[in-house]
Image (cartoon, rainbow, N blue to C red):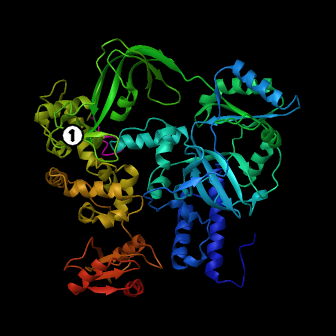
Amino acid sequence: MNLFDTNEAPEKNLIYKLTEELQEHNYKYYVLAQPVISDFEFDQKLKELQSLEERFPQYRLPDSPTLRVGGTVTKNFPVFTHKKPLLSLGNTYSTEELREFDNRVQKGLGGRSFHYVAEHKFDGVALSLHYENGVLKTGVTRGDGKQGDDITANVRTIRNIPLRLKGKLSGASIEVRGEVFMLVEDFRKINREREDIGEVPFMNPRNSTAGTLKLQDSAEVARRPLKFVAYYLDSDSLDLPDSDFEGLAWLQESDFFVSPYNTRCLALEEVFNFIDAWDSRRNELPYDIDGIVIKVDEMSLREELGYTAKNPRWAISYKYQAEKALTILNTISFQVGRTGAVTPVANLEPVLLAGTVVKRASLYNADEIARLDLHEGDTVSIEKGGEIIPKVTEVIARKPGARKFDFISECPECRTPLSRKEGESNYYCTNHRLCPPQIKGRIEHFAHRKAMNIDGLGTELIDQLVSKGMISDYGDLYALKKEDLITLDRFGEKSADNLLAGLEKSRSVPYSRVLFALGIRHVGSTVAEKLSRAFPSLESLEQATLEDLTTTPEVGEIIAQSVWDWFHQHPETIPLLGKIRSAGLQLSLSESDLPKVLSDKLQGKSILFSGKFDKYSRDDLKAMAISHGGQIASGISKKLDFLVAGEDMGPAKKTKAEDLNIRIITEDEFLSLCQ
């Protein structure tokens, strides 16, 4: 399809050209894993396309790459009825049952020859995609098999799902079924980031994927590295090949990710060879599989074989045995993290599992304890199938009269009553100021190499400093003296000198890392970097409104609220900020990081930007104002010189500015001030 016409408006052709170019880069990056441009170049092109689409929305294509970034908030997902039931597969764990399946297929086909397709059973979440005239129209979850949730806004953010079809399927109306999953390394990265911001790690890639797809904010979904693998193609209007294996090739030509390991088998013995080969190699894969799917290849023969009430007769799933062990649950202990999150841990009789001796396993939260209905002395099954942390999967046996485990109601360290907000899975201790593990955890986080990187400040030393009352928060570190340090256990003059040198060195750590080190809930290293760019000093961040924070790239409502609360709702923050300011830490961007100064035309002028703008993004306009000597305001006050009003600016803001006789100007008027 030729999108370009020399007689069309140049803006339209540019939008179409950028759309096509970015789609191709998306495919090379997310499907082929062979990028040809840098992330920065891609982001710049995407930013240019977004700007053009905002100015000329009539030219935006339904498969625009800008839809990938999300932004839609859905309170309730609409219900969608599947055209054909989305049935689950029957499971088997034995070769004998697989032979019985093969016998049933052969009997049902009267001895006619056929093929099987053997493919990896991705441990993910089923998804159905509907395309009309070659463009993605709807994305639907399995649900109960007959009806699912319409989560189209979330589905559009999954970057390896094509928004427009290519190849033999170009312009077609089809249904594609597959699995949404997460690469193991991506899952581990998310958990490392969650630990960085004081959150409890997710249980496993599948649970993380399922939870992500249910999120109401598609912008948050877009931040998660979800992927889609296609395994089924159907159409009421298109003449499809009779071979499922060939249909998968059609999908691959249309830019869908299809497993490269799918194999067409003539006989059951070839299926067994495929199963055995991957049983020993599955841990080498970048994603989790929990078995192998075996399907009759010929679509016409599938119709003859038909379905039971629950499963297709032409397919079955061979499930691999997860690595399991049985042991005794002795007790449950509760750990308090630096943000106050309380995590239950199962203390077990030591048992060998997957080559290591396991004594403890995560129980994640109160809901998991209730689901398992755990009692003292239970014989439990623990599993380590691709996850890093062993988990308790079920109770196998129980002694008569065993005591039931309930989640605690008070903090195990400071006895403060625990609280849990609506929609959260974790209980929290709210005694941030005095709860010992929270104090120590925040100091450990502050000293971490990714934060302030303070040499010589380990867990044991922090325990001593807090226990002896020498410090109550990380701000006190910079008041430590050598004569005090050498009184500590196993801490001589050399150790004291090393620590003081480490503290001195940390004073030059860049502002973005200081922001991360502060330990604000939900603010990881990436978000801290974004915040430092949007608010080039700690003072400007402290003065930011919720609206300012929410409109910052990579910062949604949850993070924005957490940042605002840290500055304005926690009494301990004010004295803490005083200490770190006195310590001389880097609390603003350095000269080299600041926008280049072009002139002093706006010197001393306080400027506020509000609404959406045509020619530039709000961040670009702020940078431009700073480069001409201006100062960015966080709200309307008598000190404000200019309110630059864009589209959709709130009427209350305009009214307040008019009441204070503040000059309201347009984007063009602002640009003329800079010329």
Determine whether 34 is above or below 466 in the image.
Answer: below
Q: Quadrant of the C terminus?
A: bottom left
Main SS of residues in magenta: loop
Which residue lies at the image location 74% right of the left edge and 64% below the top edge? 171
Q: Which residues are magenta?
A: 448-456
Q: In the visual, does 20 lie left or right of 123?
A: right
Which residue lies at the image location 32% right of the left edge and 30% below the top edge? 344
Residue sticking out furthest to the front: 309
Q: Is 654 colored magenta in this rendering? A: no
| Residue 456 in view of the camera | yes
User: Which quadrant of the figure has residue 302?
Assistant: top right
Q: Position of residue 78 (x, y in %)?
A: 51, 57
Q: Nearer the viewer, residue 311 or 652?
A: 311
User: Which quadrant of the figure has residue 124?
Assistant: top right
Q: Position of residue 335 (x, y in %)?
A: 28, 31
Q: Nearer the viewer, residue 581 or 311?
A: 311
Q: Which residue is mark 1?
A: 500
